[in-house]
Image (spheres, rainbow, N blue to C red):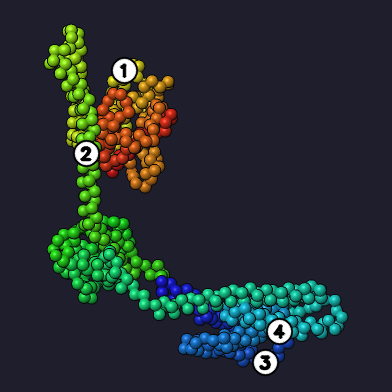
Amino acid sequence: MARTLQTSLRTLDERSLLSGVYAARLAVAYALAVAATVVRTTTVTEPSSTPLVLLIVGVPTAFTLVSWIYGRNHAIGSRFLGAQVIHDLLLTTSAVLLTGGVGSEFALFYILLVAAAGLLLGFRGAMVTAITVVIVYLTTAYWQIAPQLVAGSGTITLPNISGHVTTILWSLALSVIVFLVVGVASGIVGRRMLAQRERLVELERQLARSPFDIENLLNTIESGVLSINDQEEIDFINSTARTQLGISGVPPGGTVPERTENPGLATLYRLLLDTLRSEREVEYTELDFTDEEGDSRAVGVTTTVLYDPRGGRRGAAAIVKDVENVKRLEELARQADRLRALNELSAGLAHELQNPLAAIRSAVELLGAGTSGDARDESRLISLTIRETDRLTALIDDFKEFSGVRIRKLERVDVVAVVEDAIEVDRMAAGEGGPRTVFVRPGTPHRIDGDHNLIKQVCLNLLSNARAAVDGVAGPEIEVRVGGDAMLRELKGAGPFVALEVRDNGPGIEPEVRDRVFDPFFTTRQTGFGMGLAIVHRIVELHGGMVWADSEPGRGSRFRVALPRSS
């Protein structure tokens, strides 16, 4: 911040403005020297041109040199700046007189003079300079024009300008207005620049008096900070980083860590070195460090390139954060999630087992007591027992399938081909009276790394769920799409993904139910155990993907799967 302030102050400093003034002054002097030897008017006596050229060039050059030396060694005040303006006023007036008077091209330098006075001396200096220029300019004009006006001529002829009296007078008036307007404008700008410079100087003084110490501040933060300079030497390590790395102080002379015995410091240095040389910053990576007690700890590292105020590369820095405690908390959270999921799963399984077991128990008790009546009642009770036993078997099979889901064969899978295969299998299972499934086939393959059979199971379960949703709906429709990230706008930047979408025009899902559709044993239907979508969620999770449902009551449902695209 201090460097930025210093840069801003240099931009507003009088010395920077004076450099431009000196350059313009010398340009006028050398141009005038040429003009004095080529286009001098008859108002000037005709001595040898050499002394005149030496005078025109020598005086401004000497004055500029003295001013430059004085400005480098002394404070610049208003008197010094005023002397510069007076000198340049005399120089410009001499140039005007030597090259034709009010019609001279050098008269344009009066505008630059007034503007420079505003920037150097503020509003008051600009107005005094502008009024002085107007007086000098009009005096020169009167000196040139008065003899012709006394002669009663209707036209005025000057070395570089001629025309009717009215035209010449209007031209002079316009020049005077321009001088005054430039004086007002430059004065306002100069006053604002002076005020801004004063505020910045005061702010710099306050910062200089402030006990702000960046090193002390970095030593108080919980993250480790380490930096290297553009000479590839370590120039700073805060106290937290020293604790994390198990070292004390900065290596003497910025020693290259490969020559040290600390493997953590060497690893971090190589990471910083790569960041500095390639200017590719590391957003996040994890490394294992050994602390002072010899225990290995995981740390997260982020690197950045450091630039100076001019945009030049001056080093690289790393921010090191201890993530060991975070990892422990995450592991505890995962354990809690697993226990909660196990509890919910156990409760759901117990609930599903309770009803068929109760029915079987009642039937067996009636059969055992011999109070069932005739043979038809006994046959009904036996049939109930067999049916509920089959229901228990199906429930256990679904649970085994859910708990036993794992990737058995990892291979390159074309999701488009898998979907086509699943649609054909589902069509055969639904029979002739089933709803028609429309597959919007993409023009190119979309491949993932996964288990072909499991991905097919995902498609079949989603199709079965959609078929059950449109059962009884007039004009049932099921649509399947496969695509890329364009189908997953809500996941923009997180991919690349392969998207699978199954849409139906069924009754939709109530909002309070939508968040539970992937829970094991949760279902809103009379048949089934609610394991189909739970198995889908499990398979997608194993493949590192995501699945979710979008639905509104009365407007159908849309289930979408995002699977990491094969590299």
Q: Nearer the viewer, mark 4 or mark 2?
A: 2
Relative to 442, 298 lies left or right: left
Q: CA distance from mark 3 to mark 4?
A: 26 Å
* Residue 18 drawn at (x, y percent): 54, 81
Residue position for label 3: 47
> Which image quadrant is residue 142 in?
bottom right
Q: Earlier in the sequence, mark 2 or mark 3?
A: 3
Q: Secondary structure at mark 3?
A: loop
Q: CA distance from mark 2 to mark 1?
A: 39 Å
**Mark 1 closeness class: few <14, some 14–19, many ≥20 residues within 10 Å:** few
Q: CA distance from mark 4 to mark 2?
A: 99 Å
In the figure, 199 relative to 261: above or below?
below
* Residue 95 drawn at (x, y percent): 65, 83
Q: CA distance from mark 1 to mark 4?
A: 107 Å
Residue position for label 2: 343
Tell whether label 2 touches label 4 (CB within 8 Å). Answer: no
Q: Nearer the viewer, mark 2 or mark 1?
A: 2
Q: Secondary structure at mark 4?
A: helix
